[in-house]
Amino acid sequence: MPTPEEAQCVIAGGGPAGVMLGYLLARAGVSVIVLEKHADFFRDFRGDTVHPSTLQVMAELGLLQAFLARPHQELPALEGELGGEVVRLADFSGVPSACKFVAFMPQWDFLDFMAAEGRKLPGFRLMMSARAAGLVEHGGRVAGVRAEVEGKPVEFRADLVVACDGRDSDIRKMAGLRVRDLGSPIDVLWFRVSRRPDDATVVLGRLNHGRILVTIDRGDYWQCAFVIRKGGYHEVRGRGLEALRADVAKLAPFLSDRLEEISDWEQVKLLTVQVNRLERWWRPGLLCIGDAAHAMSPVGGIGINLAVQDAVAAANALAEPLRERRLADADLAAVEARRAPPTRLTQAGQVLVQDRVLGRVLAQDRPIKPPLVLKVVSRARTLQRLMGRVIGMGVRPEHVSAAIRGGAHDRDATTQ
């Protein structure tokens, strides 16, 4: 084994939580190494709804203008079609953020942007094709990571290891941290269909006849999520592609003339939905955040944004003790104490929607009608703005500390 490399913090996983945390800590003067097991960030059909809470973080960092220069689509309100009737569920015009919309941006663009900004900082290192293979422990504390970097063994020593390696986190398994599974009645099939200039629809979700479809505007194509019953993939596949195309056409007739583009099951990706969270997010020398601490349902598109909120909270709490080499267990416990309550509340809301709405729709192959509560929301602007704030900002939105903001451009930040 070569001589170990050292940093004040090693982050396993180059997803939204890992890259954002690495950037924030490096901006605060902490030496950081981010390990990403893949050779690039390109993974299709990953979460890519960037909510006003995350856009506000970008504003506070002075990065908003450059970030929004990347190709993206903007959604100022959330509408759904239930039983053929369009209802407006949320209006983002009143959110306390620099941006009054949800931005749809492919996750690889988000990560490329943050990685490029991180590389401008002297304390930031991002290593690709670097897979965490084991934990280094000393005196009852996690003291680093053993990794394979481009197939070669490398050991990294650090005051803190942060697991950001996703909902199937290897690090949390190695650490023996216990996961509480909340269950989910749904899985999701992802695929894409071409978008035409005259496709003017802004409806995001469609529910009817025992089927659920979400269509995300990607500029020249629709990114589609077809919701199925948990464990129902083999049944859907057994019915054949023609039946799948017919189900999609029944919900979104405007796509009927191009669904032959789905010509092979290789074009259809299965997302096995998990909703879970760690009973405890940390051990001495180790912290889990993002999906490694809590796998979220796709309901609300909150995954990236909750991961970013975790990263901001962790950086705010840990940057100074890491920089001064005085990190204590109490600092790690403080991150969990701050982020666990909003995680539990958000998951409770997701489970409620999954069980009371999505699961029930999928269980009954018949026309549905919008429930009275959604009709009331659709006709009341105040309630739409309230829902916009809940969805757009989340529970306990985090703000970057003044110490980390440093040279952030005031013109991009808003005063709340």
Image (tube, grey):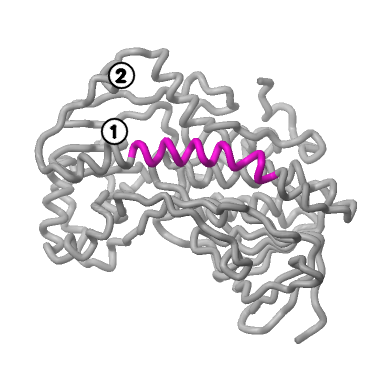
Q: Position of residue 348 (x, y in %)?
A: 44, 38
Q: Which mark is residue 378?
A: 2
Quadrant holding the N terminus: bottom right
Closer mark to the observer between disc 1 and disc 2: 2
Image-based side of 18 in relation to 405, left or right: left
Q: Is residue 80 above or below residue 5?
A: above
Comparing 356 with 50, the one in front is 356
Crowding near pointer 2: few (<14 within 10 Å), some, many (20+)? many
Q: Quadrant location of the C terminus?
A: top right
- SS at badge 2: helix
Q: Residue at x 62, y 36 (%)?
A: 65
Q: Residue at x 34, y 47 (%)?
A: 220
Q: In the image shown, does 410 or 91 lie closer to the viewer?
A: 91
Q: Which residue is mark 1?
A: 203
User: What residue is at 77 percent from the left and 66 percent from the top?
Assistant: 141
Q: Which amino acid lies under the numbered mark 1 shown in the image of this protein?
A: Val
Q: How many marks?
A: 2
Quick check: is 352 in the magenta stretch? yes
Could you tell me the amino acid type at mark 2? Ser
User: Crowdedness of circle 1 by 10 Å Cα count: few (<14), some, many (20+)?
Assistant: some
Q: For the residues marked 1 and 2, what is the alpha-carbon distance in whole angstroms?
A: 13 Å
Percent of width and height locating residue 373 = 29, 20
Determine which of the numbered discs, if any, sits on residue 269 in the image: none
Regarding mark 1 in the picture, which secondary structure is present there? loop
Q: Point out the residue furthest to the bottom here.
A: 1
Q: Is residue 115 visible?
A: no
The span picked out in magenta is 335-353
* Residue 113 picture location, percent across and down: 61, 51
